[in-house]
């Protein structure tokens, strides 16, 4: 890898299908990431600051805004970090952690690359990471909306009959259908001024999902990837994204010399129109974003 001096760059997204009214959160996150690059030039620190900002926003499906599971009580979150200095960490299905991306970062300093469930939560407590904030009215309202959709006949998850979830139910409390499929993970990719790349993602998952469901966001090569030629983060329905190893596939095209915009569009074109999907990436010379739904985003370059 060459480490020639170049302008740092940051791209941040707030999830494929999320309201673009939330773009201000992405702008703030990208600004903070650029600010961090000025402090120490570390692409990973910058990506983590960006994702922490989005987790704390409360309007996006990550950290303090993570969607409630189908039981209306549980929140399970996934997150990941990776850079070209060899740091790699992920957390899956963790509950009661305010900033899962910081837990993923801490896991990168253990002998493991991923922790899941209760073990991940215990590790978070052991290193003193703050617990989740209390549930907000927005999270409860999103859950009510999902339940109403589940009671209808239009599939909430593309290609899957809503009644399937009643048959395979694995929560302690019974399914109570009442009375929009959530898809707004957050992510950041950064090119450091020293030529290193980093990526960070965080999500409350895609709704509807069973207890224990893990999407693409904490899976290397699917929801995220960083290598000597760039970094890529994906958002959208994880069950579809993993089948294409999307982040690594798009990274491969960029590394072969394809224009970044073309590589991102080719990645999006792998999916049918009913599957929400979005991508952000940085390469040596370029940065960009592409999605088949509205996707709040921000892109900034160091002067
Ligand atoms: N990819 C995430 C998941 O499937 C959801 C999202 O991007 O909004 O867990």
Image (cartoon, rainbow, N blue to C red):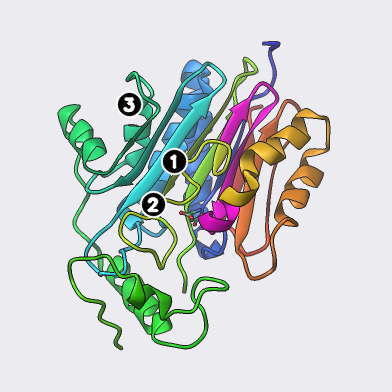
In this rendering, position of residue 144 left or right of residue 51: left
Q: Which residue is mark 1?
A: 51
Disc 3 crowd, CA 10 A, few/some/many (<14, 14-19, 20+): many
Q: Are marks 2 and 1 in contact (CB under 8 Å)?
A: yes
Alpha carbon distance from label 2 to label 1 = 9 Å
Which residues make up the magenta segment? 225-241
Residue shown at the point (75%, 57%) measured from the top left: 269
Disc 2 crowd, CA 10 A, few/some/many (<14, 14-19, 20+): many
Considering only order in the chain, which callout, 1 or 2, is on the residue closer to the N terminus? 1
Q: Is residue 202 magenta?
A: no
Q: Which residue is mark 3?
A: 106
Q: Is residue 180 above or below residue 63?
A: below
- The yes-or-no answer for disc 2 within 8 Å of ligand 1 is no
Q: Nearer the viewer, residue 209 or 48?
A: 209
Considering only order in the chain, which callout, 3 or 1, is on the residue closer to the N terminus? 1
Q: Nearer the viewer, residue 234 or 221?
A: 221
Residue shown at the point (34%, 18%) measured from the top left: 111
Residue 57 in the image: state x and y as whole percent: 37, 52
- The yes-or-no answer for disc 1 within 8 Å of ligand 1 is no
Identify the image quadrant of residue 171.
Answer: bottom left
Residue 196 in the image: state x and y as whole percent: 60, 19
């Amino acid at each position: 890898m060459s480490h020639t001096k170049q302008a740092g760059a940051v791209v941040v997204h707030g999830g494929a299908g999320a309201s673009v009214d939330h773009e201000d959160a992405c702008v703030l996150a990208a600004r903070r990431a650029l600010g961090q690059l000025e402090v120490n030039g570390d692409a990973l620190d910058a990506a983590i600051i960006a994702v922490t900002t989005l987790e704390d926003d409360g309007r996006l499906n990550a950290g303090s805004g993570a969607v409630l599971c189908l039981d209306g009580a549980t929140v399970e979150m996934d997150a990941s970090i990776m850079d070209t200095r060899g740091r790699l960490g992920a957390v899956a299905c963790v509950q009661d952690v305010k900033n899962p991306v910081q837990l993923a970062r801490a896991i990168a300093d253990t002998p493991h690359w991923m922790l899941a469930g209760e073990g991940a939560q215990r590790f978070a407590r052991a290193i003193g990471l703050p617990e989740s904030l209390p549930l907000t009215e927005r999270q409860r309202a999103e859950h009510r909306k999902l339940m109403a959709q589940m009671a209808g006949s239009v599939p909430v998850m593309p290609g899957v009959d809503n009644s399937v979830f009643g048959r395979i139910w694995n929560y302690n409390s019974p399914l109570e259908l009442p009375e929009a499929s959530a898809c707004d993970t957050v992510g950041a990719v950064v090119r450091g001024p020293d030529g290193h790349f980093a990526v960070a993602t965080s999500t409350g998952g895609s709704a509807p999902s069973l207890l224990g469901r893990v999407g693409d966001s904490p899976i290397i090569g699917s929801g995220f990837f960083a290598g000597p030629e760039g970094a890529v983060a994906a958002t959208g329905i994880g069950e579809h994204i993993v089948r294409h190893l999307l982040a690594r596939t798009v990274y491969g095209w960029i590394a072969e010399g394809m224009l970044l915009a073309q590589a991102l569009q080719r990645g999006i074109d792998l999916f049918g129109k009913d599957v929400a999907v979005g991508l952000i990436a940085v390469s040596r010379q370029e940065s960009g974003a592409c999605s088949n739904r509205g996707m709040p985003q921000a892109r900034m370059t160091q002067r």
